[in-house]
Amino acid sequence: MSRYTIRMEGTTTFNFGFDHALGYFYDKFDEVEEVTLEEKSSMFNKLTGFELSQVLESTFPADKLSRFAGCLSRMKLDLDF
């Protein structure tokens, strides 16, 4: 299993990764309100690795994603990371 977190604006975090049961997943979570704002996974929403990479690339600037370059490459090929 892999799980990564990127801080968004204010108190919101973006968590994403790959799990053997859920497949690819991501969620947006407000830490102050302790509520999930959005969540998707391969198991429940048929999220693919390519779709997850598109969400990441449309949500964050390239410089914030540079440390995840290896993960993004594997996602685009629908491989675990």
Image: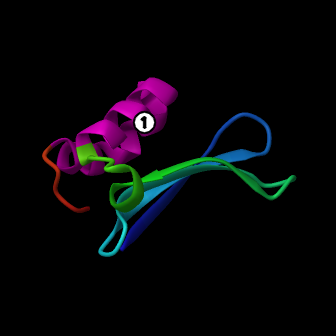
Tell me if residue 70 is in the magenta stretch.
yes
- Magenta segment, prevailing SS (helix, strand or loop): helix
Identify the residue at horizontal 41%, vertical 33% (top origin). 55
Residue 60 appears in view: no
Q: Is residue 41 left or right of residue 29?
A: left
Q: Quadrant of the C terminus?
A: bottom left
33 is higher (above) or lower (below) than 50: below
Say which quarter of the image contains residue 17: bottom left
What coloring was used for the rendering? rainbow
Identify the residue at horizontal 20%, vertical 43% (top origin). 73
Classify 10 Å Cα crowding around label 1: few (below 14), some (14-19), many (20 and above): some
Say which quarter of the image contains residue 79: bottom left
Q: Position of residue 24 (x, y in %)?
A: 34, 57
Q: Position of residue 65 (x, y in %)?
A: 42, 37
In the image, the segment drawn in magenta is 50-76
Residue to which mark 1 is pinned: 56
Q: Is residue 69 left or right of residue 32?
A: left
Q: Residue furthest front?
A: 44
Q: Position of residue 57 (x, y in %)?
A: 39, 29
Please state which amino acid type lies under the numbered disc 1: Leu
Q: Using the image as rendered, state which of residue 69 and residue 22 is in the foreground.
A: 22
> SS at mark 1?
helix
Say which quarter of the image contains residue 18: bottom left
